[in-house]
Image: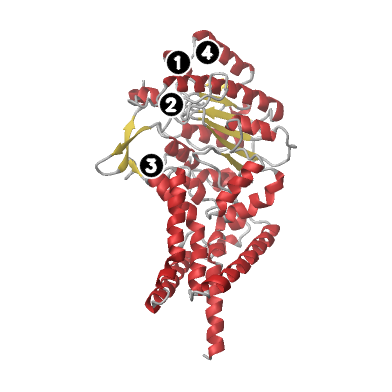
Amino acid sequence: MNISAKLLSKYLFYLLCFFLPLIQYLNKNNLQEFIAEDIFYFIISLFILIILLTVIYIYFFKKYNYPLIFLILIFNITFIFLPFRDFFLINLSFPNYLSIFLSFLLYGFLIFSPYLFLKKKIFKDFLVRLSIAYFIINFSIIFIDKNSLIYNFSEIIKEEVIVSDIPVSNNQLIKNNNTNISNIYFIIVDAMVPFYLAKEFGIINDDEIKKELDFYKKNNFLYIENSYANYDTTQLALAGIFSLDYFTKPPNELTYKKSNVFPVILYHNDNLPLLQVLKFKKIKFYYHGNSWGPCRQSLMVNCHFSKNVQILNRVLLSFYSDTPFFFLTRILKKIFKDLDQGENRQLGNYQESFSKKENDNEKKFVFIHHYGSHTPYSRDENCNKKKYADDDFNGYKNSYRCTLKEIKNFINFLNKSDPNSLVIMQADHGYKAPEKKIIKHSAPIINLMKYPENCKKYEVPKSNINSIIFTLNCAYNLDMEYKKFIFYEDGYDFPNAKFILKKRSISDLK
């Protein structure tokens, strides 16, 4: 091979390495969600990046004799910046600002470390070999990744969409949707106990409970007694909802890693059973999170944005969601009043933004995680801003009473804007006292539902997981079976640094 041919092969390899993040992104789930104009925006964004990297190489890397392949490596690892940040934030429980700082610090050290060894040829050779090894390993993974474009090429080119790993057959999924339902709203009001416990805690009295129940009945909402969470921790409760099943299963059902639960699974796993069902039924999924679990755009998970940033929302925010570009999107979301931001809490933000928008014909599933009665306590009973300490029970009491007002406001809003919707409003777990958790307080949950008459053939669900199964059965005429009730009490094994669970039956909670 002559010199020019070798040089051409070298730069073709470099170009292939540059496109590695795009190749990894074009998995079977994302590719099936593409539309033609998406490709155009990808090309434009990558063309801009090529120009940017060329300028950096000419004026910095080439000047200090950095290898080009190392610059491409740095570009590639920016696509795992957020998962890297999550390691500090979720696994080590560092504050968000410290996790971001440490991530930038380590990335900065990696970028500028070659400057310390400019005269060491052995270090330059090490960088080249490190970069090549990284790309060879990652390209090899593509051939064995069950979601990759190459692994699923024959399936992707078929017109039929095959749904797997969900507790319902394709024959069931092809049934017609329930025409009495417009959209679905699945709302988690965090840490809200049922009324009998709220009365026991001195939060509300009998007359107030009667008024609440009368309001729900008047608006066709069913208040479901004796409802319980499946887990007493948010990250597992929500993970179970998206899995349509218990998230922890034998043989390791009593241990879990914090990095593998919600919201991380929503960021890095498009194969979640709930999303797969909605994808098959051509239902658009919207996630409206909060500061604990903000939305990250993907082609299956939609974040709420105004039309001004819809192009960013669809393409750039999806592809670049794990890069430092994510922090720029947070600024954009604040400028354009995205629903994760604003003066109101999540239910109020939804109403404020969407009551002003024109209705469209798309069918949607809206998942809202409302802080409700959970810490940080930031509202008085009239929903005015007021801070309470996390261990101040008055904070829980006032947040609870505020949330009841927010729920009624939201019900009134839906009655006007989307009267034929199916609505689930329930807690993910109950009250967990900071000094001592009592499962008879942390397991019972508030549970409200509104559904059409033709869904009364299904048994009323009384747990988180069975509620999402009921929702899909009702909306899409399915017959998924309910799961046998189990409550998992969360704990921490300090000697072994593991999150552990205790398995409880219904009799333990009464």
List x then y, in percent, for residue 46. 62, 64
List x then y, in percent, for residue 40. 69, 62
SS at badge 4: helix
Residue type marked 1: Tyr
Tag shown at residue 389: 2
On the picture, is 442 further left or further right than 423? left
Residue type marked 4: Ile
Q: Nearer the viewer, residue 354 or 473?
A: 354
Alpha carbon separation for disc pair 4 and 1: 9 Å
- The residue wearing badge 3 is 248
- The residue wearing badge 4 is 209
Tell me if mark 1 has few (under 14), some (14-19) or many (20+) residues whose alpha carbon lies within 10 angstroms of its own: some
Q: Sequence order check: which comes first, mark 1 or mark 3?
A: 1
Residue type marked 3: Thr
Alpha carbon separation for disc pair 3 and 4: 35 Å
Tag shown at residue 320: none
Tell me if mark 3 has few (under 14), some (14-19) or many (20+) residues whose alpha carbon lies within 10 angstroms of its own: some
Q: Which residue is drawn at the image coordinates 68% and 35% (left, top)?
A: 353
Q: Nearer the viewer, residue 111 or 375?
A: 111
For the C terminus, the quadrant is top left
State whether residue 298 is above or below residue 5. above
